[in-house]
Amino acid sequence: MMYTGVLTKMKTEFTNPINYFLIFENDFLNINQLLDRKIKISFIKYECLNCHLDKPIYRQGFCKECFFETPRAGDWVMRPELSKAHLGEEDRDLEFEKEMQLQPHIVYLANSSDVKVGVTRKAQIPTRWIDQGAHEAIEIVEVPNRYLAGIAEVALKNHVSDKTNWRKMVTNKIVDVDLEAEKERLAPYIPEEVKPYFIQSKSKEINLSFPVLQFPDKIKSLNLDKTHEYEGVLKGIKGQYLIFEDGTVFNVRGSEGYVVKLIINLNI
């Protein structure tokens, strides 16, 4: 079986285990069904997710020019505390920024390698946790806009990490944590402006399970700019990573905007 298309982050379904799908323009693949199959990945060209031209990808699936122009890559995306739509101030496209920023956001704790604090739109729960490979997560605060979520995250990251160690995540070197207790520990550090939005009731900790047959002991990252062709037996999917039998891991989301050809060997 052969498929060709531009990579975008895998779509997911919150099932047990998580269901993963790779979406191409005229096709889609249920990646779970490819476990224990040999897959050949070949790089063909680039296709910027904004201008759709064959230009080297700079960040987040965009060429360099588009990265600094598209509202989908504004500074507020990675740094929510820089959001200004609630003030009526434009960064790159005020209407787009209002649509994205002026909606309910969640500040959460997730455990994918160690406990981290993060921010996402409420509509992205639990997708955000799945993408980070978190095996457990809990909501702390629900606010009406991205700015308030951002200033809460800035305050809390002085007391808990805001990063995921992806190597620990894909090797499953994880420890369960009482996230409700962590939530209560961090409550005093929430900014006064955000305290009214703290989720006072006992939050439900969400547990997630990923389709992995074998976790690697040592890992090597597949970079399509350096290795244009790779073949291996798929052993798992976690976060946005494909995990192969030889310890190779491939970050699908980190390769957005790359056009690839996939050949699936159904006999293995």
Image: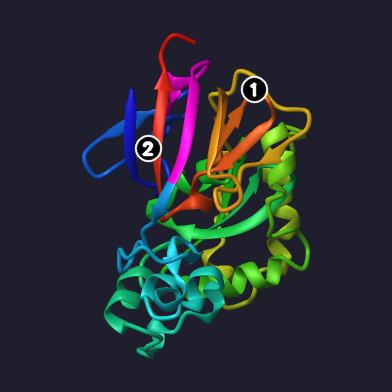
Name the residue located 44 percent from the left edge and 74 percent from the top edge. Answer: 67
User: In screen coordinates, is 72 left or right of 228?
Assistant: left
The image shows residue 38 at horizontal and vertical percentages of 50, 20
Q: Name the residue under label 2.
A: 22
Look at the numbered disc 2 and give the secondary structure of its residue: strand
Please tell me whether residue 41 is drawn above or below residue 60 in the rendered image.
Answer: above
Please tell me whether residue 72 is drawn above or below residue 126 in the rendered image.
Answer: below
Coloring scheme used? rainbow
Q: Name the residue under label 1.
A: 245
Decide which of 172, 104 is in the foreground and name it: 172
- Comparing labels 1 and 2, the label whose residue is closer to the camera: 1
Q: Is residue 114 among what the camera can see? A: yes
Magenta stretch: residue 33 in it?
Answer: yes
Q: Quadrant of residue 10?
A: top left
Name the residue located 53 percent from the left edge and 52 percent from the top edge. Answer: 254
Residue 169, label in figure: none
How many C-alpha atoms fall within 10 Å of the one at disc 1: few (<14), some, or many (≥20)?
some
Give the residues in magenta: 31-43
Decide which of 4, 162 is in the foreground and name it: 4
The image shows residue 199 at horizontal and vertical percentages of 55, 55
